[in-house]
Amino acid sequence: MMDLKGIEFECFKIDGIIGANQMAKLFWRINYSENSIEATKDLANFSKEGYETVLSFIPKPQKTPVVKANILDEKIDLTFDTGFTGTVRISNNEYDPKNTKAKSIETYGTASVGAFGAGKPESSYYFKPNEVLLDEQKFEDEIVSTGSSSLLGNEFLKKFKFIMDWKNNKIYLNKIRNYPSKLESFWVCLSIYRP
């Protein structure tokens, strides 16, 4: 239980959050470009024609999907997180900017605000590897960031219509757009005057 009127959620005017433990009871089809989400008890109600990419996942005890990834020759478990607005993020301890050929940009600040409060200010890196392997399938032109956890989020998912299948632990992806990867951010600088 949480207070959805708290400072982190008040501006969103949401009525609730459906977690993976509840979503796992149905099959889901999500399409960000059409702002649509559908659920069914029978996977046969969703045609999988055109869903050319299939990712396997391992569910955590609370049913959160985890996808095996390989980024810069590091094996990484990515939490499939439809609440994360970024693309691909790996934890800070999985990336050493001094020991990689991928050029990076360093930032500092709070990167997220969510259900459990705001993150602590920290250094983060953004880089573009030659490829990102998700469940042994290659994705190119992806920007990867670092942070407190390893996630696969909405910026990646908006390129696809996708079906979530907890019965078979599969995510079916149908590519609908080629969004060029670009680094966009919103910066705020504050000056404090003390007399």
Image: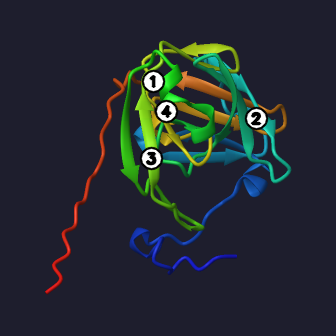
Residue 151 showing in the rendered view? no
**Secondary structure category for the residue under label 2:** helix
Residue at the disc numbered 1: 142
Quadrant into which the N terminus falls:
bottom right
Tag 2 and tag 1, C-beta contact below 8 Å = no
Tag 3 and tag 4, C-beta contact below 8 Å = no
Tag 2 and tag 3, C-beta contact below 8 Å = no
Type of amino acid under label 4: Phe
Residue at the disc numbered 4: 156
Tell me residue 55's x, y (percent): 69, 24
For marks 2 and 1, give the CA distance: 30 Å
Whether residue 68 sits left or right of residue 50 in the image: it is right
Type of amino acid under label 1: Glu
For marks 2 and 4, give the CA distance: 24 Å
Mark 3 or mark 4, which has the lower sequence index?
Answer: 3
Name the residue at 42% across, 68% down: 12
